[in-house]
Amino acid sequence: MSINPKRTVDELKELRALTGDENGAQRVAWTDTWLKARDWFESKLQALPVEHHFDAAGNRWVTLPGASEKALMIGGHLDSVPNGGWLDGCLDVLAGLEVLRRFAEEYGGRPPVTIRLVDWADEEGARFGRSLLGSSAFAGTHSIEADRSRKDRDGIRLEDALRRCGVEIDRFPEAGREQKNAAAYIELHIEQGPVLEGLGLPLAAVLGTKGVERHAITFHGQEAHSGSTPMKVRRDALAAAAKLALEIRAIAGKHPDAVCTMGSLKTFPGIVTAVVGRCETALDQRDLDAAVLARMLKEAREASERFASEEKCTVEWSRIWNIEPVPFHPELIDLCEQAIRETAVVAHRLPSGPLHDAAEVARAGIPVVMMFVQSLQGISHNKIEDTKEEHIELSVLALDRLADKAVKWIQSR
Ligand SMILES: [Zn+2]
């Protein structure tokens, strides 16, 4: 008996039946359903020669001690968005569990290096709007004061919701202790996008998570009567915004993996009988290369000023949020690609648009790589999220291969 990927598929279905309903997965972090999922997961650990505990941020650590204290970490998250899919996050945890079982069995409970499986707390940020909560506490990138008094839709404070689950936000920094002996981190995840399906490939090595520049951009023109104001003299803020909305395609189009999205637009006064005097938009730009990201930002700014002046308007920018790109470890990316080739013949490399816990681990200076498995129709955070079972099984096998390679890599360093 070795790795058994069918068991992973069965366990995913078991978890879906236990914590989902007709609208999808309901394992929102810090809720009873999430705790139920975590209890169910704990029951799976009973037969294994492992130690497990929660750290100060509520991340669960399962440790199979090895001959060396240096640890290979495998991570994922059992929490989901409301009405989520059956694979996002929990595939990572349950595939990791299967790999852990294989190591325990193959080495009689004592692998060459320590193997640690982590179920991160609140990856999704679905309830309080703060993603990567547990992994950022681990990485030391978290700011307690910024999050303490966040509230959910019912007005419950983050601090209180955590306390109900036995987690004190003031103790978050202690989660950093789990970094001790961490030598490498690997994470399997569904792609959540359409690229692999488009290529007809099951698996890819992930190069890193893209950096994000997110800005509010407001165009100011002049409100004026729709009937009496000649076209030539209008100062139409929407016209300037509309030009920018099209131009960002050309700006992103110069770079193979860059994306730019103007996902929100509000017009004022917002009636058909008035020329738009003010138009508020928001722009999200992403790329894995910091220089590309900086160039795209500069080009979008320049374009916005050009379009504002063409429309006799003005424009102002303010940053909503940004995060730097997080490239993964080049040697681990190579090992991931090898593992995929040995399992599925053809490998692909791509950056991740969504953020993942792996990015926080990388920010802590730990060598990291992720593997993506194809998503059907690129859909995620939705009950129709799906991946072919044969691809799920392949992904478990490939993760297992990658774990083996990573163990040897750790031993060689
Ligand atoms: Zn996820």
Image (cartoon, rainbow, N blue to C red):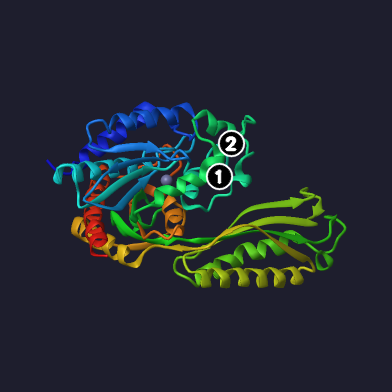
Q: Which residue is mark 2?
A: 158
Q: Outermost residue toward the right?
A: 228
The quadrant in which the N terminus is found is top left
The quadrant in which the C terminus is found is bottom left
Q: Position of residue 178 (x, y in %)?
A: 40, 48
Image check: 2 left or right of 363? Answer: left
- Badge 1 density bin: few <14, some 14–19, many ≥20, Cα 10 Å: some
Residue 162 drawn above or below residue 281: above
Residue at 21 percent across and 39 percent down: it is 6
Between 269 and 282, the residue placed more toward the observer is: 282
Three-letter amino acid code at the position of disc 1: Arg
Q: Position of residue 180 (x, y in %)?
A: 38, 52
Three-letter amino acid code at the position of disc 2: Leu
Secondary structure, mark 2, is: helix
Q: Position of residue 50 (x, y in %)?
A: 26, 38
Classify residue 45 by image quadrant.
top left
Q: Which residue is mark 1?
A: 130
Residues at discs 2 and 1 in contact (Cβ within 8 Å): yes
Residue at 33 percent across and 31 percent down: it is 42
Is the residue marked 1 within 8 Å of ligand 1, measured from its CB? no
Image check: 252 left or right of 20? Answer: right
Q: Position of residue 8 (x, y in %)?
A: 25, 39
Between 302 and 174, the residue placed more toward the observer is: 174
Query: Can you tell which mark lies on residue 75?
Result: none
Image check: 193 left or right of 51? Answer: right
